[in-house]
Image (cartoon, rainbow, N blue to C red):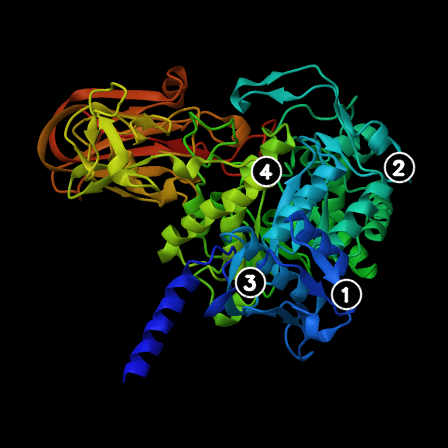
Amino acid sequence: MKKFLWLFIVYCFNLINAQNLNLIPYPKKVELKDGFFDSKQVFFVDKNSFTQFPVFKNSLKKNTIQVETTENKSKLNFTFELLSPDISGDYYELDINPKSIHIKSNSEQGQFYGFQTLLQLIQTSKDGKIPALEIRDSPTFDYRGMHLDVVRHFFTVEEVKKYLDYLAMYKYNKFHWHLTDDQGWRIEIKKYPKLTEIGAWRNGSQIGPYADLKFDDKKYGGFYTQEQIKEVVEYAKKLHIDIIPEIEMPGHSVAAIASYPELSCMKGNFQVGKKWGVEENILCPTEYTFEFLENVLDEVAELFPYEYIHIGGDEAPKKAWKESEFCQNLIKKLNLKDEHELQSYFITRIEKYLNSKGKKIIGWDEILQGGLAPNATVMSWSGIEGGIQAAKSGHKAIMTPSSSNYFDHYQGNPETEPLAFGGDTRLEKVYRYHPIPEELNAEEAKYIWGTQGNLWTEYITSFKGVEYMIFPRMMALSEVSWGSAKPEEYTDFKKRVKKHFTILDQENINYSKAIFEIEGKAKTENGTIFYELISDENPQNIRFTTNGTDPDVNSLRYENPIEIKKSQTIKAAYFENGKRISSIISQEFTFSKSTGKKLTLGFPASKNYSDGNEKILTDGIFGNTKYFGKNWLGFSGNDCIATIDLGEKMKISNVGFTALDRKGSWIYLPKSAKVFVSGNGKDFKEIKQISQSEITAHNGKININFPEKNTSFIKIKIENFGIIPDGNEGAGNKAWLFLDEIFVN
């Protein structure tokens, strides 16, 4: 009995400590053993058993570990063994005992992953002691990717190699290299030298927030020679990373058109794009264009050995095609319905050509419009719907929704973070993402190839900025894509992330410390607003004020969510040893008769913004017009029909809301707004309507006054702008309607 009890205690101890291993992504199966291996000792290796011995040796030396080779088997303390070839190539086993380390796999790839796990154990160990253990591990998803845009801002070969190093650290196996766009062409094509002579350089860049539309006049650009491309490809190969180049078409091609104007349906003196966003000038589907693209892709295919090439296919306004006599005649000749089917013809033709060269295509989810090319893989970015549609039709899908996988979004308080695209994509949101949509059955789910993190660089001007935006969020996505993420154990994951900060510090890697910030969340419960202050550290070290003054060490100590009963401003910060160690967060609450009241929507809001939670429209918080990702609801193509239950009869004479006007981001002011009242929540009577001109005149800040009504329910219908007109970014697509607080007085 005593022996059994002792074994049980040892088992529990091992289980607890296994959960405390500072590994990212966490392995699928870990079993701790007795004792430790001292990694400060000399590693004796048979170099002939390690197919990647130079890579391993350099990594160990970098961590001050001495490596020596020996043919004396009795002296070996670090070995690699081959497993059965029937086992998956990315599967590995890592066995550590107090005397030796063994990595087992049937492939170089598995060997490499086992070594990365070992390296993390060494880097996060105390005094070089790593626990004796057994790990059995392999990924769930075959596609585990990271993306880098080198067009909006350019990064050197050495910086791209560093990026690949970071991917390897966290077991990513795909690198999506965004090489062409409106603002630059970054890859040498020998048959078309003007692509880099002209297309690689722009005469200025947009600076500051997009809405300001300010530009500098500095010539900016750069490109990679074919020799440099080969160098990067060879470097990635050693890290077991496949590179997927992206050559945009038919949209986002102004840099190519500026180099070779014959590619356009339009006439003019074209310049490489300076402004971020979407341009109307897209490739014309002429034989000249197809010959050009085939020649370009011939050279691209030679440079990149991996079987996939990304052809973009996104955000291609159709105005130029609608106004082109050639395009309209081609639509008739091919018996197509419209310009969307013409784009499908364009993509399908390119796919057939690449298939003939032994290549396959990936495209953003807009390639679904007009019909999906027969063998295409869909990269679902605008939401999860594109991935669902692709999987249901038997096509591979890579899930990369902007709501959780876009690392150009803010990861902390926008007021203290570097300028970003927008959005509110914190570490926890990334970690809680699951790539397989619930709408898919088991058979359809097999088509979800994996997931990817995207980094667009409009606002990232240096490689230190790149590091800051991907770390630590790419750690979270690595665990998601490996398949070992456990959202219910997010607190444990955060602890491991903090341990990995020591690795980043050792490597002089820049990273965001937003997880140390206090985060404030408003919640509505039974008609009452509560403001919760969240910290990764000891919440009792949070101090706050309720009168708008800055908190200090003597301010109120946070213990429970703060009940908000009136208009007021809460400020809070984190303190240790009598000193404030976080930035101060500030949240203003504005009360009206609708605050905290039940609100229902006629059409659901997009889950990409504020998770589509309708309660934020009556939580007393007005959205910040600079940062439209947080405290705003977005409606894509739909009206906002909001019904508020006031709970009892009240006298009201005013309704208000704020709508955003960000046409460059496809966000438009509403066409109209109508107010209705009801005594029973069923029979509504319209009492007021305002026009688009009135909304525009007030720049979206709307106050609707009407004769006093005594009512229990109020409904407001805010009409979406509709289809974006020609001459604007996103022309032909559904406009977004963005709203914040709806207040009633």
Where residue 529 appears, x then y in whole percent?
Answer: 19, 36
Disc 2 target residue: 192
Mark 1 or 4 closer to N-term? 1
Disc 3 target residue: 391
388 over 90 or under it: above or below: above
Q: Residue at x 55, y 50 (%)?
A: 400
Mark 4 or 2 closer to N-term? 2
Side of 657 where 311 appears, left or right: right
Disc 1 target residue: 47
Check residue 655 in the rendering and tell me which mark sits there, or answer none.
none
Mark 3 or 2 closer to N-term? 2
Which of the pair 673/24 is nearer the observer?
Answer: 24
How far is disc 1 from disc 2 in space, using C-alphas? 46 Å
Disc 4 target residue: 509
Mark 2 surroundings: few (<14), some (14-19) or many (≥20) residues within 10 A: some
How far is disc 1 from disc 4 in space, using C-alphas? 31 Å
